Image: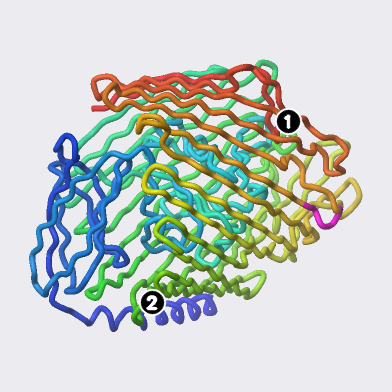
Amino acid sequence: MRELTSYLKLMVTAVLVFALPHIAVSKPSGIIEGRVTDTETGSPLVNVNIFLKGTGLGTTTDLQGRYSIAGVPAGKFEIVAQIVGYKEEKRVIELLPNQRMTLDFKLRQSAILLDEIVVTATKTTHLVSDAPIPTSVVTRKQIDKYNALDAGEAVKYLSGIRFNRSFSPMASDVFQIQGLPSRYTLVLLDGERIGGRYPLTQIPTDVVKKVEMVKGPSSVLYGSDAIGGVCNVITRALPRRHFFNTRFSYGSYEAKSLVLTHGGHFGKFGYLISACGNRTEGEEGKRNWYNMENIFGKLGWEKDRRNDWTIRGGYYHEDLSLREAKRFDVGLEGKIGLPDLSNLVVKGYRARSRDKTHVGGALEATVTDEERNRGELRWTGTLFERHLSSLGMEILYKKIEQRIEEGDELIDKSQHMESLYLQDEIIFKPVTLLVAGRLDHHSVWGTHFNPKLALLYKATNWLRLRASVGNAFKAPTSEQLYRRTWHPGGRGFWIKGNPNLEPETSTGYNLELEMQLKDVLHGKLSFFRHDLRDMIDGFWAEPYSVYSYQNIGKALTQGAEAEIKGSLFTENLAGTVKYTFLKTKDKETDKELTYRPHHRATAELGYSNRRFGLSLTLIEEYVGTRFKDWKNEEKLPHYFLTHVRVNQTLLKRLVLFLSINNLFGEKYLDMRFSEDSLTYKTGLTLKF
């Protein structure tokens, strides 16, 4: 414990050494204010993002379309007005000391949005076009277009992403980035990691503002598990007015869901609360039913965009064949703006979970109780001209208790990790260079260092090049280290953890070329490679009596992704084509990884008419041949699927939706999932 306290004191001191000189500085500042309206109608636009590029200063417009940014130091800035569904507008301004400037914006509707604000890739605020690391965004508009009911359905059609789910015994969300297994993708909710077998299925889109997807190694900022990338589900901002929404859906296999969402605002405080329940009967004769309930809420105080505190929490419950899981979590995040545009972020998080699983159909369940505590302190600011630096410290404490139900033997283990990371974004227009490194000290497997290097080159106003390379790691799970479970299969055997496991490691490479022609055409071409080492795999420690884990595997995934989207003849009609080429290898067997098609493509055609509140989307999906077995002796055939999405808004308060998957009943088999008929979901949303 003394060692843990010493590390904590050292890291807090390091962060505060950077922050305190900036806290002491105070300079004359001015105010920028104005109003944002629709060019055609003149109506005020609500929740438009107004921010000063590269500073962290900004706000959103109120119900009258007005905004005000205080505490702006004297100088020259680029100010940006941006909202989903409209073409962004930029202005270059020069503010004098103590000046009060009025600046109005008129925005024009756009069929595609290219410059969403993102934070996940660098933990600093960027437009997508300015981010040095490749980032994809699923906006609120796209979530509605896909009729996505949960976060998993929202990300399903991103290039390089595979998402399926199965509720069969011992199954889970199948969520792959660039061919890597699901366990190598870190899933976050508002920047905080969430666990369980169905992390994305648990999150109803009623509370989601957007989803940010970062591809490539990201352990330098997020630690363990971020080998393939990071999926950050960002919830809705605290509302500026009271509202109440309810959504009901019904679909194939008697799948029913009900979501109630309410939010409000009083003074500088806001709150958001949502309750969700799902019931799925599953296929006849198969044990793939699924029941889920969860409650999510957050309460916040906001002085301005740079100074706010938010507390959020949730309760999640899942009940499936052979398994029941519960989780409760609560988190606190505070942002403190400092006078010279630097800031401090303080975060704390605590989660407790219980997993009760009848492994292999055993009569007695294995009960696992886990506790996770995490704290983070991060300073971001400008140490030198052209440098945007971030220094952060993180501490993680985990405890696991596991026993076989009705058994006497109890496994009680704990571990902790202290981390220090430094990131520097160096801007020499048209080049931005990112240099970062992270040092982790773990109580079990010692000290590890993970670096990352990234480059953004803006060749022209319409052409950008990104390149990155970095190391990442995945720590052994508590189950892999300490598990002791009875499996009744065959003659019966024990599954035992291995406390001597080392972290799995990887080196990842990404190269991306991005093209943007005004607001009518956008394209990307990217290449990637992941080299994995010390992969943890199962083996018979004692033949057919004890199954355990060891570091043995090596593998690689590599390939290319292409995407092009734009308006077709009119702003109401838009098309998108996405293609992924993937090549994988298990270096131990020299065979391809299973269920990884070499070719995968989707084509979308979407029509939207804002005047009549109508949205129609047709999706054609192609999945190429892939191997079913690790010996590469059985190859599954390719298949085509057609999906349809329709939603209609009536009287601005009622939304009717219909989703049809596999319109023509194509028979196909995929990882933990098979289908041979059309499936559907339909429902309605009421807004008050």
Q: Residue at 71% across / 60% down in the picture?
A: 532
- Gap between marks 1 and 2 measured at Cα: 49 Å
Residue 638 at least partly seen: yes
* Residue for point 29% across, 67% down: 55
Say few, some or many: other residues with alpha carbon within 10 Å of mark 2 (under 14 / 14 to 19 / 20 or more).
Answer: some
Residue 586 shown in magenta? yes
Marked residue nearer the N-terminal end (1 or 2): 2
Image spot of residue 513 (x, y percent): 53, 56
Q: 676 above or below 149? A: above
Residue at image location 69% in from the left, 40% down from the top: 599
Residue 355 visible at all: no
Give how far across and how far down residue 572 sits, in percent: 36, 29
Depth check: give the residue in front, 635 or 151: 635
Per the picture, the main secondary structure of the magenta-coloured stretch is loop
Residue 638 marker: 1
State the image coordinates of residue 468 (x, y, percent, origin top left): 56, 65
The quarter of the picture where the C terminus appears is top left
56 sits left or right of 453 in the view: left
Which contiguous range is marked in magenta? 585-589
> Where, by quadrant of the figure, is residue 124 drawn?
bottom left
**Looking at the picture, does residue 328 appear above or below residue 319?**
below
Q: Image height check: is 332 above or below 238? A: below
**Image position of 342 with respect to 682: above or below:** below
Assign a secondary structure to mark 2.
strand
Q: Mark 2 — residue?
A: 387
Q: Do the residues labelled 1 and 2 touch (CB within 8 Å)?
A: no
Binning the other alpha carbons within 10 Å of mark 1 as few (below 14), some (14 to 19) or many (20 upward) gives some
| In-front residue for pair 427/548 | 427
Q: For residue 412, which quarter of the picture? A: bottom right
Check residue 226 for magenta coloring: no
Say what amino acid the circle numbered 1 marks: His
